[in-house]
C-alpha cells in the first residue's frame, strides 16, 4: 500500500520536529508526515543530566503531543531508500510513501576515534537512544572508576554529573591543551577545569588514548605516554559526524565535511529535497567557510528556514554563528562567534574589550556572582565578531543577546550605547554593566593608534 503526502520529514530530533511544525504553520493545508526510528525521542542537550540530577531517564523524553496537536502524522520506521525520480520513499517494512517535498533531518552519529579496544564491553558512546543510554546507566550502577575520552561540552557535563551525583572516580582524557578548548579562550577553559577539579574530577590534557585493555570487559585505558588508568566504564565523547548515508545513496551532493550540501534556503542539490540539523553541511556566519559546529539551536534555526521555504522561498540562513552555553559546578560559561584565538588564526586584526561586575547591586546581596565578559571586535570596522562570558545562570541569556549583536553586525560604539533594564536582584548595575563596559573599552581602543610589536 502506498501513501502520499505533501511534506515528509525524515528524523524525529530537534530539526525534524521543528521543520514539521514550521511547515504546518506556513502551509496549513498541506498533509505532513514525520518518520522516525524511535518510539520516544530524547531532548539532546539534557542527555548528560540523565546521569545525575534527572533520577528517571524518562524525564528527558520529548512530549508526544507537540506533533499530534498540530495535525502532524508520525510513523515509526526506517527509510531504506529514496527514489528521487518518482518522489517515493521505501521503508524497511517494504511500504512505499510518496512525497511532494522531503526534509532530511537524519541527525548525526558518534565519531569513532582510532583507538584499539573500542569493542570491549562497558565502552559506550553518547547516542540519542533511550534504551542504549539505559545500558550506560546500568553499567555505571556497578562501576567505581569512569574514564571519559573527550573534554568538550558533553564530556565535561557528564563528568560533573557522574561525580556530583554518583560519587564515582571520574577522569577526563583530552587531547587538546584544555577542556572546552575549541569553544573558549584559555582563561575561560581554566575556570571550567577548576570547577571540575573542585568536584574531584581528574583531568589529563594533551594526552592521547592508545588502547582500551581488558579481557571481554574494559579494565584499563592505556595512554600513548605509557600512563595506565584503571576503568570499569569508558565513555567516548569525541564528537559526531553527519548521518548522510541515505542522502548520499540517493545521489544528493555532500559538502566538504561530509554533511548534506545545502544552499541558504536549506535546499539540497535536488530542489524538492531540503535538509537541516546535524546531517546538513554547516557554513560559518563569518566568511562562509565550512565549520564543524553541530548544535540543537543551529538545527532549530535551519529547520525553521527549511520548513518555511518548502513551497515558496521565504527565508535564508545567515550561516552558523556558534552559540554555546554550559553550567559546570557553580558557574555558567557561554560563548558566541569567534573567540580571540580563532579570530587571530583566521587572520582578523582584533580589538578586545573586557569587563567584570557583580550580577547584583549592591554586591552585598545574597547569591551574588562575579560576571566576566570578553568581547572580540574587528579592528578596522569595529564590528563585533565574538564574545565570551562566565558567571551566574544569567550568562545563559547574556550570550543570546551577544548572538543578536553578532547577527546584526553591531559595532563597539553601538554596543556602548546599549540601553539595558536593570534591577538590584537581577542584573549588574547600570554603570558597571559588563557588556557595555567591555564594548566601551574596545571603542576607546579603536580611537588610539595601534601599537606595533
Image (cartoon, rainbow, N blue to C red):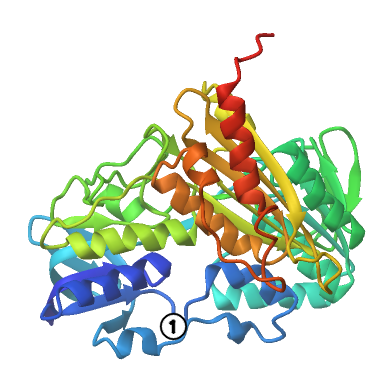
Q: Residue 99: percent from the left, percent from the top?
A: 13, 69
Residue 177 position (above or below residue 124): above
Q: In which quadrant of the rendered image does the N terminus lie?
A: bottom left
Mark 1 falls on what kind of element?
loop
In the image, 187 versus 225, the foreground residue is 187
Q: In which quadrant of the rendered image does the C terminus lie?
A: top right
Residue 78 visible in the snapshot? no
Residue 412 visible in the snapshot? yes
Q: Residue 215: percent from the left, percent from the top?
A: 82, 57
Q: Disc count in the image?
A: 1
Q: Residue at image x 69%, y 40%?
A: 354
- Extreme front residue here? 431
Crowding at mark 1 (Cα within 10 Å: few <14, some 14-19, many 20+): few
Query: What residue sits right under mark 1 in the picture?
Result: 39
Q: Residue at image x 58%, y 80%?
A: 60
Q: Residue 13: percent from the left, percent from the top?
A: 42, 69
Q: Residue at image x 52%, y 24%?
A: 348
Residue 52 position (above or below residue 58): above
The quarter of the displayed image where residue 167 is located: bottom right
Q: Residue at image x 21%, y 68%?
A: 90
Q: Residue 268: percent from the left, percent from the top?
A: 22, 48
The quarter of the displayed image where residue 421 is located: bottom right
- Extreme left residue here? 86
The quarter of the displayed image where residue 306 is located: bottom left
Question: Is 245 positioned to the left or the right of 146 in the image?
Answer: left
Question: Is 424 positioned to the left or the right of 106 in the image?
Answer: right
- Extreme top residue here? 453
Question: Is 10 positioned to the left or the right of 140 in the image?
Answer: left
In the image, 83 versus 70, the foreground residue is 70
Amino acid at each position: 500500500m502506498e501513501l502520499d503526502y505533501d511534506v515528509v520529514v525524515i528524523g524525529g530530533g530537534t530539526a525534524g520536529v521543528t521543520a514539521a511544525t514550521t511547515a504546518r504553520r506556513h502551509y496549513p493545508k498541506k498533509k505532513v508526515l514525520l518518520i522516525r526510528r524511535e518510539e520516544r525521542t530524547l531532548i539532546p542537550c539534557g542527555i548528560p543530566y540523565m546521569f545525575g540530577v534527572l533520577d528517571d531517564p524518562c524525564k528527558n523524553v520529548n512530549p508526544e503531543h507537540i506533533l499530534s496537536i498540530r495535525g502532524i502524522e508520525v510513523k515509526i520506521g526506517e527509510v531504506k531508500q529514496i527514489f528521487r525520480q518518482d518522489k517515493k520513499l521505501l521503508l524497511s517494512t517494504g511500504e512505499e510513501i510518496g512525497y511532494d517535498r522531503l526534509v532530511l533531518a537524519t541527525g548525526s552519529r558518534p565519531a569513532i576515534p582510532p583507538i584499539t579496544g573500542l569493542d570491549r564491553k562497558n565502552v559506550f558512546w553518547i547516542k540519542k537512544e533511550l534504551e542504549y543510554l539505559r545500558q550506560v546507566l546500568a553499567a555505571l550502577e556497578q562501576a567505581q572508576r569512569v574514564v571519559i575520552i573527550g573534554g568538550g561540552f558533553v564530556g565535561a557535563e557528564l563528568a560533573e554529573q557522574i561525580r556530583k551525583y554518583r560519587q564515582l572516580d571520574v577522569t577526563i582524557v583530552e587531547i587538546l591543551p584544555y577542556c572546552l578548548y575549541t569553544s573558549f579562550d584559555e582563561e575561560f577553559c581554566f575556570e571550567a577545569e577548576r570547577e571540575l577539579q573542585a568536584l574531584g574530577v581528574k583531568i589529563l590534557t594533551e594526552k592521547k588514548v592508545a588502547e582500551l585493555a581488558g579481557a571481554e570487559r574494559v579494565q584499563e585505558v592505556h595512554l600513548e605516554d605509557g600512563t595506565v588508568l584503571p576503568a570499569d566504564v569508558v565513555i567516548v565523547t569525541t564528537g559526531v559526524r553527519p548521518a548522510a548515508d541515505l542522502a548520499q545513496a540517493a545521489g544528493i551532493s555532500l559538502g566538504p565535511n561530509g554533511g548534506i550540501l545545502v544552499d541558504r534556503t536549506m535546499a539540497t542539490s535536488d530542489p524538492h529535497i531540503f535538509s537541516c540539523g546535524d546531517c546538513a553541511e554547516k557554513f560559518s556566519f563569518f566568511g562562509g567557510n565550512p565549520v564543524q559546529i553541530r548544535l540543537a539551536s543551529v538545527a532549530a534555526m535551519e529547520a525553521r528556514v527549511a520548513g518555511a521555504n518548502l513551497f515558496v522561498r521565504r527565508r535564508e540562513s545567515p550561516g552558523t554563528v556558534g552559540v554555546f552555553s554550559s553550567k559546570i559546578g557553580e558557574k555558567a560559561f557561554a560563548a558566541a562567534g569567534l573567540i580571540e584565538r580563532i579570530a587571530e588564526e583566521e587572520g582578523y586584526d582584533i580589538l578586545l574589550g573586557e569587563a567584570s561586575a557583580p550580577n547584583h547591586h549592591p554586591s552585598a546581596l545574597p547569591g551574588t556572582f562575579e560576571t566576566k565578559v570578553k568581547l572580540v571586535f574587528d579592528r578596522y570596522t569595529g564590528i563585533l565578531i565574538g564574545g565570551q562570558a562566565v558567571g551566574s545562570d544569567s550568562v545563559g541569556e547574556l550570550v543570546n543577546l551577544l548572538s543578536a549583536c553578532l547577527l546584526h553586525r553591531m559595532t563597539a560604539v553601538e554596543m556602548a550605547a546599549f540601553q539595558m533594564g536593570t534591577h538590584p536582584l537581577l542584573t549588574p548595575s547600570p554603570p558597571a554593566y559588563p557588556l557595555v563596559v567591555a564594548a566601551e573599552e574596545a571603542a576607546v581602543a579603536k580611537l588610539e593608534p595601534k601599537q606595533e610589536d
